[in-house]
Amino acid sequence: MKKALVLVLSFLFIIQYIPADDKGTAMGSFLQIVPGGRGPGVGDAVCSLDESAESVFFNPAGIASVNDLNLALGYSKWLDTLNYSSLAFSMPVKDLFTLGIGFIGLFYGSFPVITQDSAGNLAETGNSATASDIAFNITLARHITKTTTLGVTTKYISEKIENEKSDIIAFDIGLIDKLFVLDPVIGKASSPVNLGMAVINLSGKSQFISKSYSLPMTLKIGVNYTFLGMEKQHRGLFLLDVVKAVDDNAKLNMGLEYNYKETVLLRLGYKIGADLDNISMGIGFQHSLGDLHMGIDYSLVPFGDLGNTHRMGLTLSR
């Protein structure tokens, strides 16, 4: 417990002194979107979760605790014209490590090409262009102690606007530790507390058209606490993340999840420091068919005058 406290305080100290560049100055801003249907419903407070292959996107250490084959698919409709898709898969490799792969893509559709003359006037050319952002991940994670997992991700990121393209390689590293505390319901020590820490998008700079950009390196620290007892009838989960990206101010993400009989899940999220998507809500359903376990998740994230985003996810494991 003392070691975990030292790690938390050290991480928070580092986050406090990371300067914020102008918002949006880093490339790869789509990497900040949390995939799937569960995470957005709890306010993107996902750093300490270790139950799904989707951990390859926000804390690679999480897949080390996934002991079966796990497939997670996600889809989001963003602001009428944007489509965001994700795929993640993880599998344990004997007792050595857990292997994970992931793909995320943001597709902008077709939009008109606009030019600017020497006087600063804008005009449509009559032509259209397309754009897309994609990332491929490969993750290795394992237990380094009975209660601690470590994971590393290597990813290839590509951003393209018509004939212009930028490519870059980046790395993520994460740690999750289970803390044993006294559970007042069952009357003995259990591990309803997860502590997660991650550094995301470690990379150099990439050239795009005539400028050099860096990825939004992000530091995260998160904790989740299971309450209402450990029995299957009712279970609650409180989640809290502190997130600091180099091109943005620090954010505090909070979420609640209520699980009824491992079948129906209700979620609520809130962000402090977010510009538009402060509040979110979601619902999930779980069902097992033999040794196949299926989960369906949906989250609604309002974006003020820009409208609502609908996030959906499907998880299969066996």
Image (spheres, helix red, strand yellow):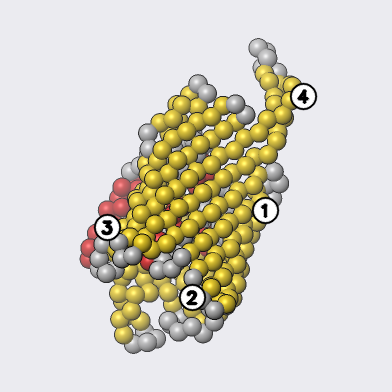
Residue 7, numbered label: 3
Q: Which residue is mark 1?
A: 308
Say which label, 4 or 2, has the lower sequence index: 4
| Quarter that holds the N terminus | bottom left
**Residue for point 43% across, 44% down:** 155
Q: Residue furthest front?
A: 94
Secondary element under disc 3, as helix, strand or loop, is helix
Q: Nearer the viewer, residue 169 or 19?
A: 169
Residue 236, numbered label: 2
Q: Is residue 149 above or below residue 275?
A: below
Q: Is residue 123 above or below residue 223?
A: above
Name the residue type under label 1. Answer: Asn
Q: Which residue is mark 4?
A: 126
Percent of width and height locating residue 298: 62, 63
Task: Give the quarter of the image for residue 49.
Answer: bottom left
Name the residue type under label 4. Answer: Gly
- 1 vs 4, front mark: 4
**Residue for point 67% across, 18% down:** 116
Q: From the viewer's perspective, tell me whether residue 177 is left or right of residue 162.
A: left
